[in-house]
Image (spheres, rainbow, N blue to C red):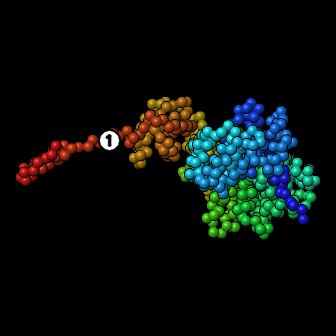
Amino acid sequence: MRNFVVSARKYRPQRFDEVVGQGHVAQTLKNALANDHLAHAFLFCGPRGVGKTTCARILAKVLNCMNPTSDQEACNECSSCKGFNDNASFNITELDAASNNSVEQMRALIEQVRFAPQQGEYRVFIIDEVHMLSASAFNAFLKTLEEPPSYAKFILATTEKHKILPTILSRCQIFDFKRIQVADIVSHLEGICKKEKIDAAQDALHIIAQKADGALRDALSIFDRIVSFGGDKINYDDVISNLNILDYDYYFKVIDYLMVEDLPNLLNIFNEILQNGFEPDIFMSGLLEHLRNLLVCKNESTVQLLEVSDSLKQKYLEQSKTCSTALILSAINLGNDCDVNYRMARNKRLHVEMAIVKMAYINRLSQAPVFGGSEKKKFDRIIAKPAGKIPNNSEKASAAQTLDSAAVNKPIQETNKVAKSSPVANHITPVKVEANDVVKQPVANTPKVQNVPAQKSAAIAADSASLLLSKLENEFLDEDAEEGDSEIPTLETIERVWAEQIALQNSPTFKNILKHAKIELNENVLVVHVGSTVAKEMVINGTEFSRALKHGVSYPNLIMQVNVDPEQLTAQQQVQPKKVLTIKETYEQMKEINPAVEDLRKKFGLKVDK
């Protein structure tokens, strides 16, 4: 049985040009060698398996090479290079700080620094996992690291830079190694497959690269395992079977079922995944990654962030065209909540199934307004109101655009819509509501909005929804007035009615806010300046006050816009703190209220302190 050498050792880079994904480090070191600006101490930092020790060995090899090439690479022919390749070089010392971290072992290393190289120009000391050294060992190493002999070079490597003493960091030239990109790992694996004469599918290599999470050594270890299983041929099915990864096709089917609200098939496919031995959280994590990829495909400028094969990228692009952005964002929100609360759930399968059920009816959820509390009640009241005057086409278009920006991604659909039995992405078309349809169908026949908690939205979306509510209320809730029957009132008239309505308010807080608010009239828009966000919310939610004000000025088309102005502080915020009275001042006030207090003091011979 021949000796097997793992790919991570067999194909370890021997030149700077062969280092994968760390071109910035390799080029900097080559320039330093060419210009003779090489530091005496280096610190290579970065995740595991990205080439820190490999670059340190290549640098040590080039430093002692007798005939370096013009591009600062080792010749691999001189006695120094051959000795290094055979692990017989006395000028290069490698130390594992994880197992040699005591003061005695560090002192032994310092003793070796005293001896000059017998062959070559430099003695190179490579200390791997340097963060494992004890504090005493670091302190013992400080002086030598700061002022070493001219022939000594130190190369330190670590995965945890934050654990190294600042005094060590200040004495080293630091190089940060980055995680290797999926494309670079795939390219490297393809080169190895050609040398080993292995037929590998590109999708399979992409899965290996993604599973490695930026570590080339991990990718090579996974590659050896897959080769041991499949021999000279690596296919996609073998990789996902060995790495316990769900097939992409599952997630494409799930999204197709979500778009047509096919809940039975969603639950069946989830059950199939569980029967194949996958945990519910693995399914949810993969679904979130799939949704993220669909969101990335929504814009041409972000498609490059998709780290998958070309064939799979095309499938993502096709599905993203049939899936709305609002559905993707809502599904990600639901899936993220499920993932966060997964550990606390007792029935984990039911926990994930409930998230799937909610995702299946996102289209109906999105019909609910994105606001809550009194604003939601106001919206429900507007929807339930019998049809009065019908808005014109421009008003309907403006309202639809505002609702769309507030994450209501679809118009209210027919409740008797039947889900298709087999989802076909090419047959999915968004439902459109024409302007004439709104005129023909009265508002009273609109399906009732389900009492489902609405999705959270951004602050700007909530403000847009609030403005829309104000517009809807101005247009549809005033039954007594007709358009064009009144003229725009003057500011004096509004101020008079404003003062009258303040006196009729029951809430002292609301009354105080209105009393100290500043009002301005800009055509048919009444601008109200208040002192805080809380005051703004109270004025916006004061529907009865707004309606009474419009009736009082006989102008139903008056639009109220509320702004926050810190200068318009309420009376409560401007109250000065009370003065603290002395004992004598308190006694004087008591004496004024009741003169008998003075007689009592004299009777008992009491004295009042100052």
> Quick one: 270 or 383, which is closer to the camera?
270
Question: Which residue is tagged 1?
Answer: 577
Task: Return the x and y of residue 468 as percentages of the image width and height.
Answer: 61, 42
Could you say whether the residue bearing mark 1 is in a helix, strand or loop? loop
Q: Residue at x 90, y 65 (%)?
A: 1
Q: Is residue 65 above or below residue 215?
A: above
Q: Quadrant of the C terminus?
A: top left
Left or right placement of residue 234 versus residue 159 in this view: right
Amino acid at pointer 1: Pro
Q: Residue at x 74, y 61 (%)?
A: 283
Other-residue count near label 1 (Cα within 10 Å), few / some / many at <14 / 14–19 / ≥20: few
> Quick one: 241 or 473, which is closer to the camera?
241
> Quick one: 580 or 222, which is closer to the camera?
222
Q: Residue at x 91, y 53 (%)?
A: 196
Count the labels in the image. Answer: 1
- Using the rendered image of the protein, determine whether residue 80 is visible from the camera's viewpoint: yes
Task: Return the x and y of residue 213 as percentages of the image width and height.
Answer: 74, 52
The image quadrant that residue 482 belongs to is top right
Q: Residue at x 11, y 48 (%)?
A: 607
